[in-house]
Amino acid sequence: MMSNSPESGSVEHPQRSRARRTRTPELNAQVGPFVLPPLLALPEQVSALPDEATHSITKRVGRVAAQMVQQLNQHTGALANTQTVFNQMLDMLPEVSQAFEDAFTARQKPSSELARRLAHSRIAAQIDPDRSVGLMHVLWQTLSFTTRGNTKPLALALPGQSPRFCGRIIALHGDFFELSSRCGETADFACLLEHEIASLYVPEDPMEPFVMTMRHATDVPSVKLYPADAARQFLMRTIEMVCCGGFLHEQPFKSL
């Protein structure tokens, strides 16, 4: 029988000798400018690696799954609070509509332009059967409020604050259904957001302040609202911004 001792003349390869002695995490030892992965470092140990690799994958997938479940739970809680606030807003729309009608009626004069407008224009509230869209028609102005778009966990990031997952109520300038038709059934929600006036972000914790962002406000782009009064404040501030403003004449030609 041939001996493996140095005296027998058989010379053992130094790298194999080192490999048999090193069955540890040093498998990732750097070789030249590269770092060999475990499966390439010691081919003779491949049979022992699948269990370790499977455990590593399971552990890492578990961490990802835990994080996603946490996001989903926060999203679900925020969505429930958002729908509660939105239902409060929808219940206010008929009251606001009636208040507008009474206010205009008290200010009109016979045969006045206002009287003609009231006779041919709409002052009305409209609520979608699934209570995900509410419309407010005030003479020539139309506002839409919707919770559609809350289809996945989304976080609000404000300067100097950590992002937090929130539901969102969006106020749009125009009729939601006409805007959706213009954008197309398969259009990205970003198309509707081109008509955004303001948004109300509702966190998971109903005791935390809500955040109202206003798209065209340059001096104060966002404000915090108390949860107990957030629905009324958001509704009325949005109506005030739109109805107290106006439209500009279109200028299709460049000035000379």
Image (cartoon, rainbow, N blue to C red):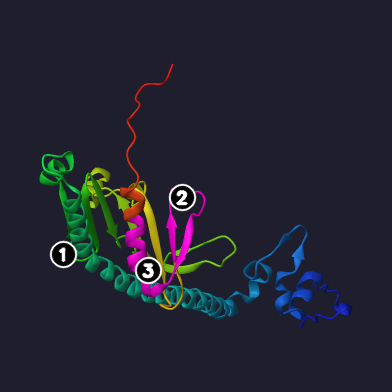
The kind of residue tagged 2 is Ala
Image height check: is 84 above or below 106? Answer: below
Mark 1: which secondary structure?
loop
Name the kind of residue labelled 1 in the image.
Answer: Pro
Q: Dividing the image into 4 quarters, which one contains the C terminus?
A: top left
Q: Residue at x 44, y 73 (%)?
A: 71
Q: Residue furthest right?
A: 7
The residue sitting at 75% across, 78% down in the picture is 22
Q: Which residue is mark 3?
A: 230
- The earlier-in-sequence mark between 2 and 3 is 2
Label count reads 3
Q: Position of residue 209 (x, y in %)?
A: 46, 72
Q: Nearer the viewer, residue 239 or 115?
A: 115
Q: Eyeballing the image, is 43 above or below 251?
A: below
Residue that mark 2 sits on: 217
Q: Is residue 32 left or right of residue 69?
A: right
Residue sitting nearer the eye, 127 or 91:
91
- Magenta-colored stretch includes residue 30: no
**Magenta extent:** 211-238
Q: Position of residue 211 (x, y in %)?
A: 45, 65
Q: Position of residue 20 (x, y in %)?
A: 74, 78
Number of residues whose C-alpha sits closer than 10 Å to that of mark 3, classed few (under 14), some (14–19) or many (20 or more): many
How far, Cα to Cα, is label 2 from label 3?
A: 19 Å
Q: Mark 1 or 2 closer to N-term?
A: 1
Q: Which mark is first along the chain, 3 or 1?
A: 1
How far is disc 1 from disc 3 in space, using C-alphas?
23 Å
Which residue is located at x 28 percent, y 58 percent? 145
Residues at badges 1 and 2 in contact (C-beta under 8 Å)?
A: no
* Identity, as a three-letter code, of the amino acid under mark 3: Ala
Q: Which residue is mark 1?
A: 129
Residues at circles 2 and 3 in contact by the CB criterion of under 8 Å: no
